[in-house]
Structure formats: structure tokens, C-alpha cells
Amino acid sequence: MSTVAISQPDARSRGAARGWSDLTIRNIFIIPTVAFLIIFNVFPLIYSLGYSFTDYAANRGGSWNFVGLQNYRMLLSDPQVWQNFVITAKYVIVSVTGQMVVGFGLALLLNRSFPLKGLVTTLLLLPMMMSAAVVGLFWQLLYSPSWGPINYIFGLGDFPWLSNPNAALYAIAITDIWMWAPFVMLLSLAGLSAVPKHLYEAAAIDRAGWWYTFTRITLPLVTPLLLIALIFRTMEAFKTFDIAFTMTSQPSAELIAVRLYKQAFQQWDTGKSCAFAYIVLLVVLAITNIYVKYLNKAKER
């Protein structure tokens, strides 16, 4: 006795049974998503842009005056703001470069078969799954000059990593590298696993050296994914707040996100902080566009 499989009607067939058109079914899924994006993304963006042209302060109620571009002029003429950008630029260069080097290096090591490869890969991915604030507090303990293991391991005595004006920024960058290098490793592993094996076999037959194989086969084919990782990590590095705020209050390590927080929620200068946020946004967009241009060139090769 043969059994006939009865398939359950999908959403489209159920809609058709009710007399719904394809356009109606599509709108049922699209309209709520668009409404959500407008309410929680677009509206706050436009609202904060309006505040950036006022002297509004959140702690004194709804009174405000239109000041035009005064907030932007004051910020762009403030030497401390430029100092924050210099500190953040230094942090982004050190942090993102470290993440790219460490992450890609780990991917090269993991791009082979060995016992417990899955367990090792999972353990290496754990840091980026943790809360940034927890990571900051954890590394604050590691950097402790009294009993922190880092000073003990490297024989640095009572070196004050987080209170030293010359070392605090690099201490935060090292923490960020530890946390986010696995993200670069994950994207790099995806790129390395997609490289055709016959290219390596052809290089081996031609007796090509490891450097030639790396620069002519591996690196060019993985470059698009590396650039994607670079774009994401650069944008996130500019927004770094949790780690820096929990680890140190050293002025030499005050990133723009920390400065923005202090201006908005400690000084309650809401209008100026909104203008500051848009200046940062424009800087990040400019840098991202440069990366995207190189990414498009890499894809065309």
C-alpha cells in the first residue's frame, strides 16, 4: 500500500487561496520592516540632526534656541576635539592593524587539518562573544600594577599600564586586538577555504616557493574578504567606548566616543554633542568610502 505525501501549503499558496496577490504578500513582509527602520533608525537620525543646530540641553527641559552652525564651528575650532581625533586615529591604526595581522596569521595556522581543530577554533572565537564592558574589566585586572599577571610575566615590576599617559592607549588597543582579532580570523578562514586547491597543486608542480604562492595566490584571492574585515573593524574602532571607558580615565587615552559621552551625559550639552556625533559620522563615512573603492578594485581583478 503506497502512501502519498501531502505537502503543507506555503505562505504563497495560502495567500493565493485567500485571493491575495503576490504584491500583497510581499508588502505584508516589507512594510513592518520598513516601519521599524524608520521609527528606530531614520527618525532618531533626523531628530538628532535638528538638535545639532540648537543649544538644546536634555537636563533643562524642552527649551532651546536655534544657533545655526555655531555648534559645528565651536567644535571644529576646539583644539581638544582635534586632540581627541588624533588619539582616536592612533588607536584605530594600532588596533585595526593588530587585528588584521593577528587574525590573518591565526587563519593561516588554522587552514589545515589537525586534531581538535574545531575545539581550538571555537576557543579562539570566544573573546568576540563576550561583553565589551566585561572584557575591559577583565583586562583591567590583568594590567594591575600590584598583582596583575602581565607585569609578572614580562618582568615589568609595578608598571602602571592604565595610569601611564604613554601606555594607556596601547593597553586599550591590545585589549581590543585580543577581543576582535577572532572576527578577522573567521572572515580570513572563509576566504582561505574558498581558494581552489588546484592552484596550490599547480604551484607545487612548478616548484614555486612559499612566498610566491602566498603573494600570487593566497593573498590576492583573500584580499576582498580582508578588506571587508578592515571596513567593519575600522568603523567599530572609531566607535569604541565600552573598553576605553571601563579601563581608564587617562586624558591621553580619551577616544572620541568617550569625549562624546562626557559632553552628552555629564556636561548635558545635547546640541553640541549631536553636532559632534555628525562630524564623527562624516569622518567614518569618508574613510569607509575609500575602503569601498579599493574593495571594488580588488573584486574587478
Image (cartoon, rainbow, N blue to C red):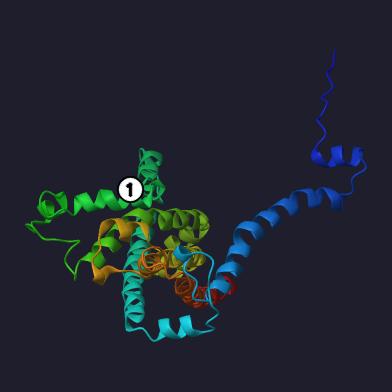
Q: Relative to the observer, which residue lies in front, 289 or 212?
A: 289
Q: Report crowding for label 1: few under 14, some 14 to 19, many 20 or more residues within 10 A (C-alpha).
A: few
Q: Relative to the observer, which residue lies in front, 18 or 74?
A: 74
At label 1, which amino acid type do we have? Answer: Val
Left or right of 80 in this view: 152: left
Q: At 70% across and 56% down in the image, what residue appears?
A: 35
Q: At 51% across and 78% down in the image, what residue appears?
A: 286
> What x and y, as percent, mark residue 168?
22, 65
Q: At 37% across and 68% down in the image, what residue appears?
A: 267
> What x and y, as percent, mark residue 293?
55, 77
Q: Is residue 26 visible?
A: yes
Label 1: state its secondary structure: helix
Where 76 falls versus 261 (above or below)?
A: below
Q: Is residue 207 visible?
A: no
Quadrant of the frame with the C terminus? bottom right
Q: At 23% across and 66% down in the image, what residue appears?
A: 250
Where 56 falls versus 103 (above or below)?
A: below
| Res 297 → quadrant | bottom right
> What x and y, as percent, mark residue 64?
53, 73
Quadrant of the frame with the N terminus? top right
Left or right of 4 in this view: 211: left
Q: Which residue is mark 1?
A: 134
Left or right of 167 in this view: 242: right
Question: How many numbered callouts?
Answer: 1
Q: Relative to the observer, which residue lies in front, 292 or 116?
A: 292
| Res 263 → quadrant | bottom left
